[in-house]
Amino acid sequence: MANNQSHYVPPERNIPFMIETNHQDTLSSSLSSSPPLSQYKCHGLWYTVVLSIPAVLLVLYLGFHLRKSIRKLRHRRSHVMITYYILLWFSATLNLAWCSLQMWQCTPGKELSWNLLSLLTALGTLFLEISLVAFLLQESYASGLEALTSTFIISGLIVGADVLLKAICVFGFYVPLFMDGETTHRGKWVVWTVDELLLTCTYGYILFVHYSTWRDKLPPRPAFYNYVVVMFVITGIALFGCGLAAIGVGLGLWMYNLIVICYHALYLPFVYITFLVDFFQEEDLILDNAYYSEMKDAGFFDSDLE
């Protein structure tokens, strides 16, 4: 009995401390294994600044001329111009937010917000793009409201289906459509390739009809066809870049990123200059011509002729 008592070992009293230590070690190892913010492929500050400058300038320009534009819209009472001016403001605001919040891509917990913002921005710009094409292809839009309503119904169905499919891909199948850091995901490039292919085919078909013997079936609007040429080139380059990126060619990724930058920086100003600026400057030009005629009748330019 004495021998057994001499070998008696009391239970360890520091087991809870050991369990707590092991728990802390496991927690620290799990935190160290999760990718920190610096390991995410983020765009730098200068990228965000350069991308945001055109968007900021457009919003400032629209805001500076807002009162004057509203006055002309009220005076002319054009349902078409009022609608597209509102669409331009909507798209420009979302585009500014998208350009200035690029860091959301690599901020933990902001993936949902970034995907929703990207979907809304794509919805605004794509609806503007498709509705412009559908509206201007009509033979006559003098009535305005009726043609605009039918155009918006068709464009809304197309854009709604496109955004719904992208939302299913992003939130249902976890395809990183809007994450620039994901460059090797095949599903991402398949979706973007199909998207750009449809747009390229649409613009290509319009140009084919315009430069063929069936050009009489299209309305004669030179500015619109210049717009279609530019968009055909842009979507064609984007399609080629997506195809190369899908097979792992680095040049394709570079081309696609360049087109994305150009699209978000220049598309909305391009639309404004092509289709809206003449409407807002028309009365100013009429007044300038009237002042010139009055000055000419008064003999202000007789010395120049001599």
Image (cartoon, grey):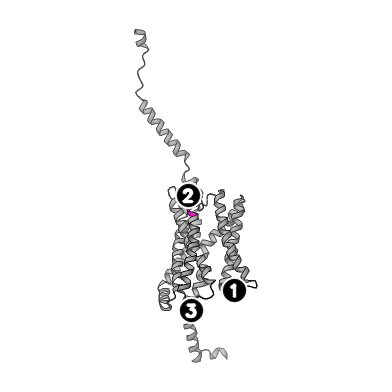
SS of the residue under disc 1: helix
Query: Is residue 45 in sight in this rendering?
Result: no
Mark 2 or 1, nearer chain start: 2
Looking at the picture, how far across and down is residue 96, in whole percent? 45, 61
Q: Could you classify mark 1 by the number of other residues whose Cα lies within 10 Å: few (under 14), some (14-19), or many (20 or more)?
A: few
Mark 3 or 2, nearer chain start: 2
Query: Is residue 226 in sight in this rendering?
Result: yes
Type of the residue with mark 1 = Lys
Pointer 3 residue:
282
Nearer the observer, disc 2 or disc 1? 1
Nearer the observer, disc 3 or disc 2? 2
Q: Which residue is at 49% across, 68% downward? A: 151
Kindly report the distance in space between the C-alpha atoms of the residues bearing marks 3 and 2.
49 Å
- Looking at the image, do the residues carrying marks 3 and 2 touch, with CB atoms under 8 Å apart? no
Kindly report the distance in space between the C-alpha atoms of the residues bearing marks 2 and 1.
43 Å
Nearer the observer, disc 3 or disc 1? 1
SS of the residue under disc 2: helix
Type of the residue with mark 2 = Gly
Pointer 1 residue:
217
Pointer 2 residue:
172
Q: Which residue is at 44% across, 51% downward? A: 112
Type of the residue with mark 3 = Glu
Depth check: give the residue in front, 150 or 78. 150
Depth check: give the residue in front, 207 or 140. 140
Looking at the picture, how far across and down is residue 45, in whole percent? 48, 54
As for residue 157 lying within the magenta part, the answer is no
Q: Could you classify mark 2 by the number of other residues whose Cα lies within 10 Å: few (under 14), some (14-19), or many (20 or more)?
A: few
Looking at the picture, how far across and down is residue 51, in whole percent? 50, 59
Mark 3 or 1, nearer chain start: 1
Q: Is residue 263 above or below residue 190?
A: below
In magenta, the rendered stretch is 166-173
All told, the count of numbered labels is 3
